[in-house]
Image (cartoon, rainbow, N blue to C red):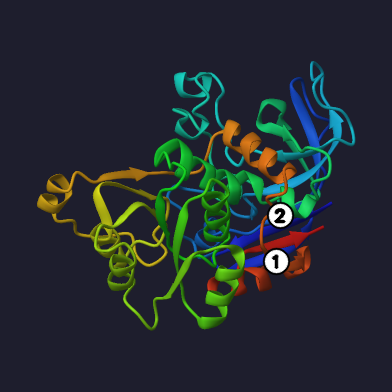
């Protein structure tokens, strides 16, 4: 079968490899149909792994497919069922896993496509407990955005930031995969959405998506515009995944008692915070990573109700690297999908 492998930093190879064995007890075998690209894939491609890993490594952290075979004891899934897979090998037995807090697993075996072999291959065996059925009517292309793009936003906005109807939220990088989802999810519950983008073209697309106010951060300071838009009161929530120099600006535009939730640092992982500002304004800062399996189910339910991802580009498996280049060049508005 085909497998897209990282053989060295920034060096991918589409290889012929032996197929996996028949699924064991409690396992399923999935035929991959679509892979969603994320900045996590870029970090792995650049060699930015935060743990030791062995190469060659099959890439791909987010995917959808169909059940090809089931192992003994698996009754909830059958051949032909459309599914998505959780993107980390959680233990399933620690307290966090038992409580449904999968992304806080105390003995995680690694992130797929980053620490351990990922989904960019024709067939993969997975524990059935890490596989989620896809409701009828959702395409494989769209479903492939549920485990990370939709699930991450669901966890950030609703589990962590506790976003409420009629609140005002600032969504950074509104043209990114998760930024477009955040705009949609916030608007769906009646929030006022302010978003930042890097070009006038993206600004028009963000407005069409439903954003109430769009700031081209290459032309204007988002801090100034956001404070004007809120009559200097600030926003209730900042959806942050950029980091770098803009992080303190994000704190500046929060109202007293406001919440900032962050899951990324594409502009830089190190910031300095004024602690007096933090405690005097009673800000709440949430770090958020990945999502739970429940979040994936919630995301698929939203897709089934008509909230679909914004797809920027589709590329075949052999052109995976072209998709990464588009993501790395910040050209995207929405998600890049790799099709099989």
Where is residue 122? Give x, y as percent: 81, 50
Q: Residue furthest right?
A: 80
Where is residue 10? Give x, y as percent: 57, 69
Whether residue 240 is visible, yes or no, is: no
Whether residue 182 is visible, yes or no, is: yes
Front position among marks 1 and 2: 2
Up-down: is 310 above or below 162? below
Q: Nearer the viewer, residue 78 or 127?
A: 78
**Residue displayed at 65% across by 34% down:** 297
Q: Nearer the viewer, residue 59 or 311?
A: 311
Location of mark 1 (residue) = 320
Q: Circle 2: is it few (<14), some (14-19), or many (20+) Cα within 10 Å? A: many
Up-down: is 45 above or below 91? below
Q: Are marks 1 and 2 in contact (CB under 8 Å)?
A: yes
Location of mark 2 (residue) = 35
Position of 214 with respect to 56 (left or right) is left
Where is residue 270? Give x, y as percent: 27, 60
């Amino acid at each position: 079968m085909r497998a897209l492998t990282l053989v060295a930093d920034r060096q991918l190879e589409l290889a012929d490899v032996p197929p996996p064995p028949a699924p064991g007890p409690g396992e399923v075998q999935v035929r991959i149909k679509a892979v969603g690209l994320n900045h996590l894939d870029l970090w792995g491609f650049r060699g930015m792994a935060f743990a030791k890993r062995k190469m060659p490594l099959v890439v791909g952290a987010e995917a959808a497919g169909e059940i090809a075979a089931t192992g003994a004891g698996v009754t909830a899934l059958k051949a032909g069922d459309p599914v998505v897979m959780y993107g980390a090998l959680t233990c399933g037995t620690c307290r966090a896993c038992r409580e449904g807090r999968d992304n806080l697993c105390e003995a995680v075996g690694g992130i797929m496509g980053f620490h351990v072999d990922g989904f960019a291959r024709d067939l993969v065996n997975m524990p059935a407990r890490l596989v989620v059925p896809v409701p009828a009517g959702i395409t494989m292309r769209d479903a492939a955005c549920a485990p990370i793009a939709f699930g991450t936003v669901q966890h950030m906005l609703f589990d962590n930031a506790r976003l409420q109807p009629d609140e005002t939220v600032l969504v950074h990088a509104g043209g990114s995969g998760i930024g477009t989802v955040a705009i949609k999810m916030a608007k769906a519950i009646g929030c006022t959405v302010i978003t930042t983008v890097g070009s006038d073209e993206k600004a028009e697309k963000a407005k069409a998506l439903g954003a109430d106010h769009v700031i081209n951060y290459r032309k204007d300071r988002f801090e100034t515009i956001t404070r004007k838009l809120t009559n200097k009161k600030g926003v209730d929530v900042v959806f942050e995944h950029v980091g770098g120099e803009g992080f303190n600006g994000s704190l500046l535009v929060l109202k007293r008692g406001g919440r900032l939730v962050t899951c990324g640092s594409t502009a830089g992982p190190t910031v300095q915070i004024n602690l007096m500002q933090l405690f005097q304004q009673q800000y709440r800062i949430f770090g958020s990573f990945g999502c739970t399996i429940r979040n994936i189910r919630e995301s698929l339910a939203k897709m089934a109700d008509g909230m679909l991802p914004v797809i920027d580009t589709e590329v075949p498996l052999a052109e995976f690297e072209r998709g990464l280049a588009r993501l790395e060049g910040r050209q995207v508005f929405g998600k890049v999908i790799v099709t099989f």
